[in-house]
Image (cartoon, grey):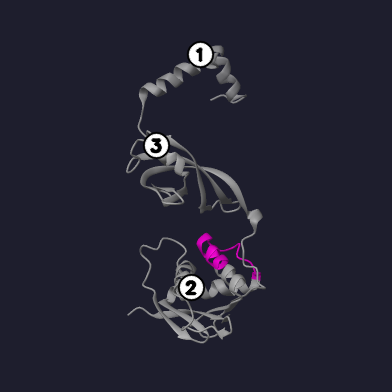
Amino acid sequence: MEKIGYIEIRITGSKGNLALSPDNYDIREIISVLENAENLLYPGDKRDRPTISYKIEEGSVKHILKTSIQYIIGFNAIIGQLNQVQNIDFLDLSTAVAFENIQDIAAKRDYVFSIRTSLTESNEVLVDKTTHYYRTEAIWADAEFYFYGKLTNAGGKDKANIHIFTEELGTVRIQTPIAFLEQYNENLLYKTFGIRATGKQHSETGEIDTSTLKFIELVYYQPKYDELYLKKLRDKAKKSWLGSINPDAWLREIRGGYEA
């Protein structure tokens, strides 16, 4: 049987004149914590992750999330490092964003978050309105990207987006102007396209912050061998620089003083 551990997210604060407790803790706040807790434990692909079970307890509010001890051990190391360096720049993107979201809640509601694990002598990190767990802005630079793949979804009531399935990143969601989707008569779904987009990229690791992607243009993508197109390129090259050189002299120049 798989060994189980847990992380504990304890929140202290108040609701008006009342101390925070499970009785006055709103369901939307529970949902927010659960979404962020999943990214704390499993920053990557979540399709094959182990089960996470949940319960809420008094004191003021305790979120208990149980899962495989292997991931609890890894998370304990993360919060230990977090306490040492006092910044989140070393974290995977989704884990860093989860800490940013928790920091936002702490600042807006004047809550104190205590995050620890079930391990003996567990590390612990505190997040409150005085802490500053945000990514360093300078590390994330504006960049332009091309994504190639099959469009699996397009639309949205207020904030429209396109979902494109890529081999490298899986499904990527790109914010798209409603005006573009309104004027586009052709059915886009389940066809292969390229999408040009802007977004943030980590200047050291190259990681893309997919939550920042914004649509620029749709690119028709034909990933097949086209002999006619290649012949046109060769003919164009012959008429330009290839037609004006002496092949033997060019080869001697390339080889320099080396003789085979």
x and y percentages locating residue 177 in the rendered image: 48, 44
Residue at point 51%, 43% (across, down):
197
Mark 2–mark 3 Cα distance, whole angstroms, equals 39 Å
Mark 2–mark 1 Cα distance, whole angstroms, equals 67 Å
Q: Which residue is mark 1?
A: 239
Residue 13 appears in the picture as rendered: no
Look at the numbered discs 2 and 3 and tell me whether their residues touch, using CB distance below 8 Å. Answer: no
x and y percentages locating residue 25 in the rendered image: 48, 79
Magenta-drawn segment: 85-101
Q: Amino acid at mark 2?
A: Glu
Most extreme residue toward the front is 17
Q: Which residue is mark 2?
A: 29
Residue 99 on the magenta span: yes
How many callouts does the rendering have?
Answer: 3
Residue 90 on the magenta span: yes
Instruction: Using the image as rendered, state which of residue 27 and residue 138 is in the foreground.
Output: 27
From the image, state whether disc 2 or disc 1 is nearer to you.
2
Q: Residue 113 appears in which quarter of the rendering? A: bottom right
Q: Which of the marked residues, 2 or 1, is nearer the chain's N terminus?
A: 2
Q: Amino acid at mark 1?
A: Lys
